[in-house]
């Protein structure tokens, strides 16, 4: 029986919930656990879904249970339907942030933590001091956590995002270099001098658990935008220090034989805070976008809307600096 033959008046909305969880978990057992129902009840739900859509939905393969093409087509549609239903039943009252004690869990990259987070915290201390912020690192979070609404939003530089996610570009940034004023390279800061110096590498942070770097084996693309752009120009820099934290380069660049190449907003802040010189990178490095992404399940949630608006406003202010 095709879905076009279904009597909508008698349609069980729970089936869409079952379908959403089954496609997310790819396991009848895990889906049952997630919904707090028995495995036989979930198996029966899958049977009804197969009858409803005239499709197996999930099939057993060597990699476990895999979704059919039809199921993958349905997944974003079902997610949007459930998000609209969630919106319809949300309280319509205005979110009273000034008296709220709500916890917001936000995944932020080191870059976002160094640039945007201080402004967010400062604003909240004035307007909503009862709100609690739980900042997570990319290695703490998966796309699945964001999709399920376990994490309110993710703020990072994303190569790609799941199709179902909502997203907003907060700003664009380019790259600059931090150098000790006594570093001899400043006498003629050009590509030749840049290449002859030693460098500090800062990670390109993405989703998932990070791994160590092997300078002799890792390709430029694995080292991030700075080294990939240099490689495309036919060059390679000498990296002496690898770090995953944007707070470190300013301290390390105090050595007069090291150069830190950083996103300009971070470099500007650190140059102002310390006795360092900021100069333009001596070659073209493509700009990148800092984005905020969130689940459609939270898109219409009033507290979430309020927080997204606050983050967007603070980002706009910082983008002008």
Image: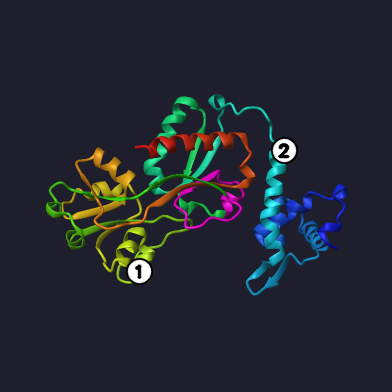
| Horizontal side, residue 316 vs residue 88: left or right | left
Q: What colour scheme was applied to this rendering of the protein?
A: rainbow
Dot 2 surroundings within 10 Å: few (below 14), some, or many (20 or more)?
Answer: few
Q: Position of residue 73 (x, y in %)?
A: 68, 61
Q: Do the CB atoms of the residues marked 2 and 1 lie less than 8 Å apart?
A: no
Residue 186, image x, y percentages? 15, 51
Residue 30 in view here: no
Q: Residue at x 17, y 59 (%)?
A: 193
The residue that mark 2 highlights is: 88
Picture coordinates of residue 200, whole percent (x, y) = 26, 56
Q: Which mark is residue 218?
A: 1
Nearest to the eye among marks 2 and 1: give it: 2
Q: In the rendered image of this protein, does residue 320 appear above or below residue 21?
A: above
Q: Please tell me how crowded label 1 is: few (under 14), some (14-19), or many (20+) other residues with Cα within 10 Å.
A: few
Chief secondary structure of the magenta span?
A: loop
The image shows residue 307, relative to residue 148, as above or below, that is above
Which label's residue is closer to the chain start, 2 or 1? 2
Side of 207 relative to 198 (left or right): right
SS type, badge 1: loop
Bounds of the magenta span?
144-165
Q: Is residue 132 left or right of residue 115?
A: right
Residue 14 locus on image (x, y percent): 78, 50
Q: Secondary structure at mark 2?
A: helix
- In this rendered view, identify the residue nearer to me: 17 or 174: 174
């Amino acid at each position: 029986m095709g879905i076009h033959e279904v009597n909508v008046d008698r349609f069980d909305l729970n089936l869409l919930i079952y379908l959403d969880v089954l496609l997310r978990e790819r396991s009848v057992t895990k889906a049952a656990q997630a919904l707090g129902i028995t495995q036989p009840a979930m198996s029966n739900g899958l049977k009804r879904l197969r009858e409803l859509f005239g499709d197996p939905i999930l099939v057993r393969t060597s990699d476990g249970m895999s979704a059919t093409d039809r199921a993958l087509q349905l997944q974003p549609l079902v997610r949007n339907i459930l998000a609209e239903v969630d919106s319809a039943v949300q309280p319509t009252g205005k979110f009273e942030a000034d008296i709220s004690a709500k916890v917001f869990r936000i995944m932020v990259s080191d870059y976002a933590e160094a640039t945007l987070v201080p402004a967010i915290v400062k604003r909240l201390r004035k307007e909503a001091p009862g709100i609690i912020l739980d900042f997570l690192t990319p290695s703490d979070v998966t796309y699945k956590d964001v999709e399920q609404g376990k994490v309110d939003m993710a703020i990072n530089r994303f190569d790609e995002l799941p199709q179902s996610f909502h997203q907003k570009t907060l700003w664009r940034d380019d790259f600059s270099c931090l150098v000790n004023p006594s570093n001899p390279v400043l006498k003629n800061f050009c590509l030749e001098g840049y290449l002859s110096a030693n460098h500090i590498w800062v990670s390109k942070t993405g989703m998932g658990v990070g791994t160590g770097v092997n300078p002799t084996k890792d390709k430029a693309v694995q080292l991030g935008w700075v080294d990939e752009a240099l490689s495309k120009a036919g060059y390679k820099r000498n990296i002496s220090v690898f770090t995953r934290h944007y707070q470190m380069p300013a301290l390390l660049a105090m050595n007069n034989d090291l150069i830190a190449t950083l996103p300009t907003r971070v470099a500007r802040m650190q140059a102002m805070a310390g006795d360092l010189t900021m100069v333009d990178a001596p070659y073209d490095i493509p700009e990148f976008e800092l984005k905020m992404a969130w689940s459609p399940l939270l898109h219409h949630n009033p507290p979430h809307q309020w927080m997204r608006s606050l983050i967007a406003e603070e980002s706009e202010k910082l983008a002008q600096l």
